[in-house]
Image (spheres, grey):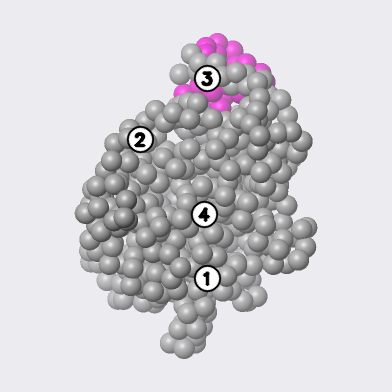
Amino acid sequence: MGIIIKDALAVLPVNGEDVIGKHSIYIDGDKIVGIDNEPEGFKADTTIDGKDRLVIPGLINAHTHTYMSMMRNCADDLSFMDWLFKTIDPIEGQLRDEDAYWGSLLGQLEMIKSGTTMFNDQQMHIHQTTKAVMESGMRASICRGLVGGEYDRNDVRLNQALEEIEDGKKCDRLSFFFGPHAPYTCGPEYLRMCADVAKEKGLGIHIHLSESVTESENMMKDHNCTPIEYALNAGVFDVPTIAAHCVQVTPDDIKILADKKVSVVTNPASNMKLGNGFAPVPEMMAAGVNVCLGTDGAASNNSQNMFREMGYLSLIHKGTHKTPQCISAKEVFKIATINGAKALGKGDEIGSIEVGKKADLAILRLDVPSMMPNNNLLAALCYSASGSEVDSVIINGQIIMEKREVKTIDEERVYFEIREMCKRLGLADKTY
Ligand code: NI
């Protein structure tokens, strides 16, 4: 199917810098086949008028747990450990497998409507999530959450993960990482086993690291090292690693992350909401760490909206560092796009608008109050947009949302199923 987006403003990389100019973008099949130059023999089935429109590479949510979307606003204003072990874990224990399917679809709806085209998901229900991704048309990296203590190649979850990965290979929008949950739920030998199997299978690892003060204090008490050193010693960083959070990191930790080329996903809203603090993002960037951006799950954020996350990312560091130069709108936009693509091993395929890359795009309205006047649009994306400006979304060359109507997901059905589920799980507010 051929699509032209005609005469729109678009964010394109020029010598490594994002530059906004007026362009026409030609899409054929799943790829961008031309920018301004119409390829020979190109036939358009669909023409999108670019007047008052801004085309951006789809945002990449590099750390979330989509199935937890039904837990939005049900565990708030709690300490991290009470949030996790006293509230979230008991709800997780009651989830039926199909609940994860509806939860993931709800998370994906929210992401599509706010311009995200790929997400990196850690969860326990791979089949349900892969089914939801196959239907929604999104691109996703799926990571089976793993917890354990011993070096055990017969570990049930590990082998389930391997089977699920085989099964998911039939969809080219799906990719897979191993997801050992965190140092406080995975013993060193178990982590080493995950790293060994990941290396054998050519997979990366997606892990939570150094999220809270309690985690770091307990690690020092029990193992006399930081969570980053613990993961290093277990061999985790010998495979491509995406480390979520990295809030409580020392200067030595930052050096390890840079040396081992670990990609760090910062999750500013989740870290602030759980009272965990701020990751030292400017310092990690200065050390050469590939920093990308994630929402974390709706149980802790409580949103899946990457525009909100971009805003927080820039503002908290300007505020806490008391200098507005420590992170720019350009850097934030890269963190939310190409850096996420690189972390997920897809830097050559997605994350920017270039000929030959996959057509994963979000088209925003500029004729709305939040984007008017159209002065510095990169600043507008970071500081002014809320996500509601996203009008249409194309993923893998398919129009997934057109004029805010998501074509692949039955929204009403998702809302119905989520409401019923929340009643069953006792999460729904009984006063209305
Ligand atoms: Ni998380």
Residue 31 part of the magenta-drawn span: yes
Disc 2 designates what residue? 411
Where does the image place residue 368, in percent across and percent down from the top left? Answer: 63, 31
Secondary structure of the residue carrying tag 2 is: helix
11 displayed left or right of 129: right
In reply to whether residue 146 is colored magenta, the answer given is no
Vertical arrangement, residue 188 with respect to residue 241, above or below: below
Q: Does residue 34 appear left or right of residue 295 in this picture?
A: right
Q: CA distance from mark 1 to mark 4?
A: 17 Å
Pick the front one: 7 or 368: 368
Q: Does the residue at mark 3 contact the one at mark 1 (Cβ under 8 Å)?
A: no
Q: Which residues are magenta?
A: 25-44
Instruction: Find the residue positioned furthest to the front.
Output: 431
Residue type at the position of mark 2:
Glu
Instruction: Name the residue beneath numbered marker 3.
Output: 3
Q: Earlier in the sequence, mark 4 or mark 2?
A: 4
- Name the front one of labels 3 and 4: 4
How packed mark 4 is, by other alpha carbons closer than 10 Å (few <14, some 14-19, many 20 or more), is many
Label 1: which residue? Answer: 275
Q: What residue did someone put label 4 on?
A: 294
Residue type for callout 1: Gly
Sooner in the amino-acid sequence: mark 1 or mark 4: 1
Picture quarter with the N terminus: top left
